[in-house]
Image (cartoon, rainbow, N blue to C red):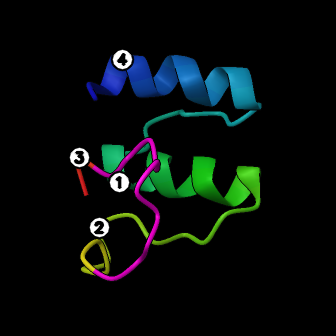
Amino acid sequence: MKIDEIKVLAKEKGVKAGKMKKAELILAIQREEGNEECYNSGKAAICGQEQCLWREDC
C-alpha cells in the first residue's frame, strides 16, 4: 500500500499522520484499532493474521 493510501486510512481512523514514516503510521493505525503493533516485526510467518491489511507489505 502506498503512503498516500495509508494517510487516508489513518485520517479515517483518527490518526494524525503528520510527518510519520510509513512504518510508524501503520503501527499507529494498528494501535488505534486495538491490534498488536506487529508491522515489520519479522513475525509475519508466524502471526496467524492472514487477513491483515498490512500482510503483503509486512
Front label number (2 vs 4):
2
Q: Quadrant of the C terminus?
A: bottom left
- Asked if residue 44 lies in the magenta stretch, the reply is no
Determine whether 1 is above or below 42 in the image: above
Three-letter code for the amino acid on which mark 3 is drawn: Glu
Which segment is the magenta one?
46-55
Q: Which image quadrant for residue 45?
A: bottom left
Cα separation, mark 2 vs mark 3, equals 11 Å
Q: Nearer the viewer, mark 4 or mark 3?
A: 3
Report the residue at 43% width, 55% height from top: 24
Would you name the residue on which mark 3 appears?
A: 56
Q: Secondary structure at mark 4?
A: helix
Q: Amino acid at mark 4?
A: Asp
Callout in the foreground (2, 3): 3
Do labels 4 and 3 touch, CB within 8 Å? no
Of the numbered discs 4 and 3, the one sitting upstream in the chain is 4
Numbered label attached to residue 4: 4
Mark toward the start of the polypeptide (2 vs 1) = 1
Residue type, mark 2 in image: Asn
Please report whichever mark, 2 or 4, sits nearer to the chain's N-terminal start: 4
Q: Which residue corresponds to mark 1?
A: 23
Q: Residues within 10 Å of mark 2 (few under 14, many from 20)?
A: some
Q: Nearer the viewer, mark 3 or mark 1?
A: 3
Question: Residue 40 has which mark?
Answer: 2
**Residue 52 percent coordinates (x, y):** 46, 50
Q: CA distance from mark 2 to mark 1?
A: 7 Å
| Residue situated in front as seen by the camera: 12 or 43 | 43
Instruction: Decide if residue 41 is on the left or right side of residue 16.
Output: left
